């Protein structure tokens, strides 16, 4: 029985080594307009455009598309594609403004791209970005199915960038609920369901909704409420809780401790996967978002104003920043000292 993401085929440590091997070869740097600017290792990269920084990031829907294939429903994965990118972009306080997509397919059936387009448009509307271009590649010799990737462009005043350097002990951690698994951990999820002979039509315990419906729930797009919050109050850091789970907080500032003392409720689908495979808490919290899809770090005096635009999403204070390092979940007795991604 598979009990870890690595056993299912995705070793995040090995992935990190692959990323480092690639990045070590990227030595050239442009100078002048368009030169690299801003924090390294953040959720998006930036280049200098004078008073403004232009942000860029790219991400895919991952193996969630295999669930869409099984359900023969592709009208939501476009939302996921937009969300995976714009939620990263807004982590620096940058406003996403434009998006491009890349769809690779194994056949020339217009129905799949049509449905994908429905989701892309819905995601773009929610994030307030324009899809300015894209590419559709037909590669029957390379693919068995399809892949969906996007890239986002955003802008931020360089004096207003939120890069985590302003985080201090005493700051509060505001957690915002996820809409489910988002796009992370699907290789492990699918393996667990398959090994337990659970189909996409079977109900999720304590939910009643079928697994296929739960797994295709689109990733929540946080852009508009986060932009509203940072316009109202001082914010020290922003984190999209994606692959790597709560370890994503360490990317903001490694030399403080993010202590979560009152975590958001864990939705039943996460507990069901954990129960089916006997996965331990540590593996769950470093693979999945566990119900917290985004986190805002803010000084105590700003928390009330930060929560204003976020309360409708179910946001609340889940912990605070302390002296130390890493992430601690006091309730579970877990400590994560470094980001794997």
Image (cartoon, helix red, strand yellow):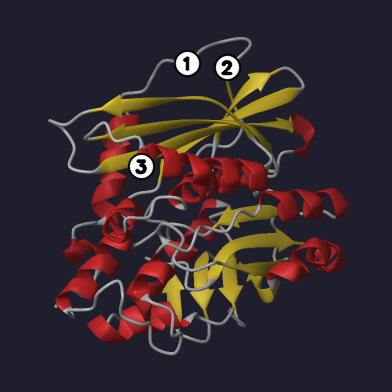
Badge 3 crowding class, 10 Å Cα cut-off, few under 14, some 14 to 19, many 20 or more, is some
Q: Which residue is mark 1?
A: 29
| 198 up-or-down from 166: above or below | below
Percent position of residue 66, x then y: 28, 54
Residue at the farthest top position: 32
Element marked by disc 1: loop
Query: Which badge, 2 or 3, comes first in the chain's sequence?
Result: 2
Q: Tell me, yes or no, whether the two marked residues, 1 and 3, touch with CB atoms within 8 Å.
A: no
Quarter occupied by the N terminus = bottom left
| 63 up-or-down from 191: above or below | above
Q: Which residue is mark 2?
A: 35
Element marked by disc 3: helix
Percent position of residue 143, x then y: 18, 37
Q: Residue 194's quadrant in the figure?
A: bottom left
Residue 83 seen in this snapshot: yes
Q: Which residue is mark 3?
A: 112
Left of 305 or right of it: where is 165? Answer: left
Element marked by disc 2: loop
């Amino acid at each position: 029985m598979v009990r870890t993401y690595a056993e299912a085929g995705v070793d995040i440590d090995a992935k990190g080594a692959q990323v480092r091997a690639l990045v070590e070869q990227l030595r050239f740097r442009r100078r002048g307009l368009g030169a690299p600017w801003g924090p390294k290792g953040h959720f998006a990269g930036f280049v200098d455009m004078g008073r403004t920084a232009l942000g860029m990031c790219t991400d895919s829907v991952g193996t969630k598309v295999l669930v869409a294939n099984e359900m023969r429903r592709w009208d939501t994965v476009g939302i996921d594609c937009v969300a995976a990118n714009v939620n990263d972009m807004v982590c620096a306080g940058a406003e996403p403004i434009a998006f491009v997509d890349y769809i690779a397919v194994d056949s020339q059936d217009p129905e799949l791209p049509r449905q994908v387009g429905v989701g892309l448009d819905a995601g773009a509307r929610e994030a307030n970005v324009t899809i300015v271009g894209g590419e559709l590649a037909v590669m029957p010799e390379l693919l068995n199915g399809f892949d969906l990737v996007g890239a986002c462009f955003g802008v931020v005043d360089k004096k207003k960038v939120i890069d985590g350097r302003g985080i201090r002990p005493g700051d509060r951690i505001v957690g915002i609920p996820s809409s489910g698994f988002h796009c992370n951990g699907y290789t492990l999820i699918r393996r667990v369901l398959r090994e337990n002979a659970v189909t996409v039509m079977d109900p999720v315990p304590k939910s009643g909704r079928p697994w296929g419906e739960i797994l295709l729930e689109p990733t929540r797009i946080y852009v508009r409420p986060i932009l509203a919050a940072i316009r109202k109050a001082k914010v020290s850091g922003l984190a999209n809780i994606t692959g790597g789970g709560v370890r994503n907080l360490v990317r903001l500032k490694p030399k403080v401790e993010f202590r979560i003392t009152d975590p958001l409720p864990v939705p039943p689908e996460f507990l069901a996967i954990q129960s089916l495979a006997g996965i331990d808490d540590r593996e769950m919290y470093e693979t999945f978002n566990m119900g917290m899809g985004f986190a805002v770090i803010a000084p105590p005096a700003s928390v009330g104003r930060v929560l204003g635009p976020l309360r409708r999403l179910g946001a609340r204070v889940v912990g605070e920043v302390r002296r130390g390092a890493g992430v601690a979940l006091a309730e579970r007795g877990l400590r994560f000292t470094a980001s794997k991604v």
